[in-house]
Amino acid sequence: MNFLQDWASAAHTSVGFFWMALWAFALGYLVSSLIQVMVSRGRMKRLMGDDSPKSMALGTFFGFISSSCSFAALSTTRALFNKGASFPASMAFLLASTNLVIELGFVIAIFLSWQFVAGEYIGGLLLIVFAWLYIKLTSPTGLIKSARKQEDGEDEDNSSKAWRALLSRETWQQVAKKYQMEWQMVWQDVLLGFTAAGIISAFVPSEFFHWLFQGSGAEVSDASFWQVLQQTIVGPLAAFFTFIGSMGNIPLAAVLYGEGVAFAGVMAFIFSDLIVLPVLRINAKYYGWKMALYIALMLFVCLVLTALTLHYGLFAFDALPDHSQQQHITERAFFSVDYGFILNIIFVAVSVGLVYLTQRQTHQHSHHGHHHDHHHHAKSWRDHLMNGLCAVAGVWLVIGLILNGVL
């Protein structure tokens, strides 16, 4: 019976985490689709076409006003890069869109403390600076050219649309088509990522994480530098196995902190939503595996440096948070009627409308005899593996939700 209860809890958690992030997914993909349709390569080059401080600042600002969902941020970043934004400015956008967002600060304030809120925003800026320095020092010119060459084939139209074009049906049909393509590209990674998060949260005891972070539970003054460093390095590894995105990571980060993990380790865990396997696979689709691995290594080095800088910066002012004041988080109301619920309803309606436009356009083309030949390529073993895993995940969630309603 305990296994069945854990199964029900895992499925409920997986679906609950996805429900929490649904509006951010939809908003991010809508922004990405609008950018791809409305913004020309020439315009984007003028705004973010180099690695100057101005371009970096614009990339950071655009990220700040964008979604905090890592999947959606990846899509929008790829759109900006595809439109001619420089690689450093694109990375600034990516890091800002997953760290420098208002709603993320609200969630952190609810589950953790003001030090973590400050660490999230200051650390987001530090991540951007360290990433810019890392790119300057390593100078991956060949990788950038190769990745941009792969992207060039996706969009040959360099013309720019006036914003009044948003009033036309044709423009929104193009946006709807892009929107649907974005979901088709990442739905498998989303399904597997959230399913795995629920399973781990239900079946893996907190004692495992306590063992994983050596020295956790010690007083701040008693933790050695090497213990803090080990926890900071392990933080991204723990995030790899508990991935649920930048928003959903916060409750699990609170669990880690409640178990005595150092501030640096918790911050490294929070910052690590962009270096886990689903994100790595998406970046490989966008830029190729070499660039995807380069980005992952860059982010890992930068987040470790950022977390250590924040930890010892607060330590110098005797401002590190007190473990004893942190309560354990065992339950979370995923489906309460709040602003997230309202936003989900709004963006579900928007998504239905966009799907309707896409289907209407397809029907019209078929009616007028515009038939296109599609070349079907043989699926690789990875495609078959992903399809199989997704089928298993779907069955797991359906049965788990049934158990959740029965038990």
Image (cartoon, rainbow, N blue to C red):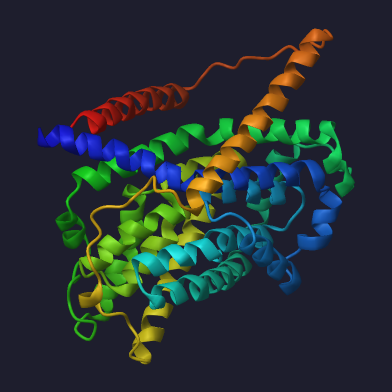
149 or 154: nearer the eye? Answer: 154
Say if residue 17 shows up in the picture. yes
Residue 160 appears in the figure: no
The residue under the point 27% across, 39% down is: 10
Provide residue 168's location: percent of width, then percent of height: 86, 36
Q: Position of residue 393 (x, y in %)?
A: 35, 29
Image quadrant occupied by the C terminus: top left
Image mark count = 0
Q: Is residue 180 above or below residue 58?
A: above
- 363 relative to 388 in the view: left or right: right
Seen in the image, is 63 located left or right of residue 161? left
Q: Quadrant of the N terminus?
A: top left
Name the side, left or right, on which 242 lies relative to 221: right
Give me the residue at 83% from left, 32% from top.
169
On the image, the x and y values in percent for residue 196 come to 33, 40
Find residue 215 and report its image quarter: bottom left
Q: Can you name the residue that lies furthest to the bottom here? A: 317
User: Which is more toward the observer, 307 or 130?
Assistant: 307
Q: Residue furthest left?
A: 1
- Residue 406: quadrant of the picture: top left
Asked whether 247 or 279 is in front, the reply is 247
The residue under the point 19% across, 84% down is 222
Horizontal and vertical percent position of residue 83: 76, 48
Q: Residue at x 32, y 43 (%)?
A: 13
Dividing the picture into quadrants, the one containing residue 18 is top left
Q: Classify 269 as above or below 149.
A: below
